Image (spheres, rainbow, N blue to C red):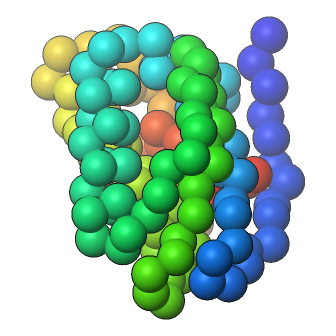
Amino acid sequence: MTVHRTQHRTSHNELGHVHEWTFGCYRGYPFLARQRVCQWLAEAIRQVRQELGMALWAYVVMPDHVHRLVRFGRREYDISQVLRQLKWPVSRKALAFVRANALEWLPKLPTQRGQKTEFHFWQRGGGD
């Protein structure tokens, strides 16, 4: 069964605030069951930790979603930008991999936004 989540959350940018993030793969597909995808996610986390001083308190990666507890204590930040920095590199690498190695997945990933066709790795809503 595929679950479609469309809820949106409110972002708070308070220095020292602990954030719980949960975000899932598009349409609940188990993309995070692949080691290479987990590696791309780990690299994105490492990059954000270095750039923004994000402390990763806890995390769990499931086949179709990820949970994290994080805290920023050193400088100002924008949660929306941080989430983009975490999610965008993984999405870009995964979609490039699909285009090069798993074309059978491509028809499962598009959505229409006006006249534009977009391909998704992460589900919108919740952790967006």
Q: Is residue 79 visible?
A: yes
Q: Would you identify the image quadrant in which residue 88 lies?
A: bottom left
Q: Position of residue 18 (x, y in %)?
A: 69, 63
8 vs 124, left or right, is right
Q: Is residue 24 left or right of residue 77?
A: right
Position of residue 117 measured from the top left corner of the image (x, y, whole percent): 45, 52
Q: Quadrant of the C terminus?
A: bottom right
Residue 20: x and y, percent? Answer: 71, 52
Q: Nearer the viewer, residue 31 or 96?
A: 31
Outermost residue on the left side: it is 100
Residue 28 vs 94, above or below: the answer is above
Label count reads 0
Q: Let me know if residue 113 appears in the view.
A: no
Between 123 and 13, the one lying in front of the other is 13
Residue 5 relative to residue 124: left or right? right
Relative image position of residue 27 (x, y in whole percent): 66, 29
Q: Residue furthest bottom?
A: 76
**Going 68% across and 84% down the picture, which residue do you hit?**
14
Residue 111: name its quadrant: top right
Q: Residue at x 52, y 76 (%)?
A: 73
**At 81% across and 61% down in the image, what residue appears?**
8
**Quadrant in which the N terminus appears:** top right
Q: Residue furthest right?
A: 7
Residue 4 sits above or below residue 6 on the image: above
Q: Quadrant of residue 26?
A: top right
Q: Residue at x 43, y 51 (%)?
A: 87
Q: Please say if 21 is above or below 102.
A: below
